[in-house]
Image: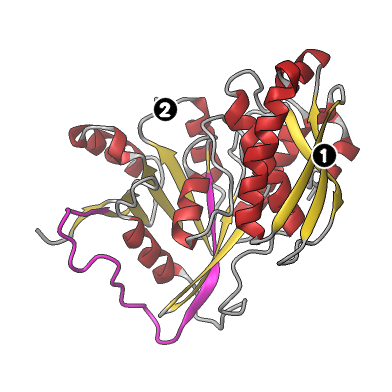
Amino acid sequence: MPETLVPRQSGQVHVTSDDRESAGEVTPPHEGRKSGFVAFVGRPNAGKSTLLNRIVGHKLAIVSDKPQTTRTRIVGVKNYADGQIVFVDTPGVHKPTHRMNVRMVDVALDSMRDVDVLTLIVDVSAKPGPGDRHLLELMKDVSRPVVLALNKVDMIAKPALLPIIDRYSQSHPFVEIVPISAADGTNVDVLESLFLKYLPVGDPMYPEDFVTDQSDRFFVSEIIREQVLRLTHDELPFSTAVLIDQFQEPAPGQVSTIYCTILVERESQKPIVIGKGGAMIKDIGTASRRELERFFDARIHLDLHVKVRSEWRDDERALDDIGLRES
């Protein structure tokens, strides 16, 4: 069965069968290669980072089932036969409770203003709430094309999808509505081709071998933070951060030493990270070191310490130190 396009009042809904011979083919409205920015926005845990990683083909953003995992703007670049897209992953839009959250939401809102195409990513497996309505309100002030990606369609029954499509198609004039699964790749190729359709004609902004503008220090802190989140489970929410105290550029054939501090907010959280007899901090260090050695293709010696910094999420200097700077 070929791809079917279901016309909506507000754009096109793309529903693709398992047999998609023509998926991803787009005829640009103008001759020439396309180039531009596409931003992903949505509530926490909508799947923005998973989608970025799948599209770019590199793990640029850490992924966790905990909300507010992504804290800053993450850029990923991908080249196509028809052009180049600079993808911008953003923190989930939520009600700020600390200065850190204010900065995170500011990053997301700033990204909405500075791109060529905006993509609202919605988790269709989650019950809609005030956060979804708030995002739709924000869309009213957006003048550029807005694509709606209904994510996690692999987690719901197909009949449940149509009412969701109807509800969103009446809430905003989306130029396209695409049911996808960032986890298994369903319709992601269709989504990518549609981005190119709405980008302006222009030369690539980055060389072909460019993937991201994030620094090595950023990836070190994120890799360690991902292991902290994974291994401490629900005992530590988003009240932890990783500071790079000393960073030696890894080199093949040499052992590079990286010194880091894991920040927690309360004294009661410190034993959780350290563990009985130091078992937890050892596990975090071992898992992080393995990831870092794969990332740098070099031998790493990782030195981790845990420090309590009360209310660091409201500490302007601490937020600067973890790279979450004011826009």
Please rate how many residues cluster around mark 2, counting C-alpha atoms within 10 Å: few if below 14, some from 14 to 19, many from 20.
Answer: few
What residue lies at 39% left-to-right and 70% top-to-bottom?
197
| Residue 48 horizontal/vertical position (percent) | 50, 46
Element class at badge 2: loop
Q: Give coordinates of residue 120: x percent, y percent.
A: 47, 47
Q: Is residue 84 above or below residue 13?
A: below
**Residue drawn at x 57%, y 62% as measured from the top left:** 76
Q: Quadrant of residue 214?
A: bottom right
In the picture as drawn, the residue positioned furthest to the bottom comes out as 31
Q: Nearer the viewer, mark 2 or mark 1?
A: 1
Which amino acid, by three-letter code, is at mark 2?
Pro
Quadrant where the N terminus is found in the figure = bottom left
Q: Quadrant of residue 255?
A: bottom right
Q: Residue furthest front?
A: 253
Q: x and y percent of residue 303 in the render? A: 81, 41
Q: Is residue 185 left or right of residue 282?
A: left
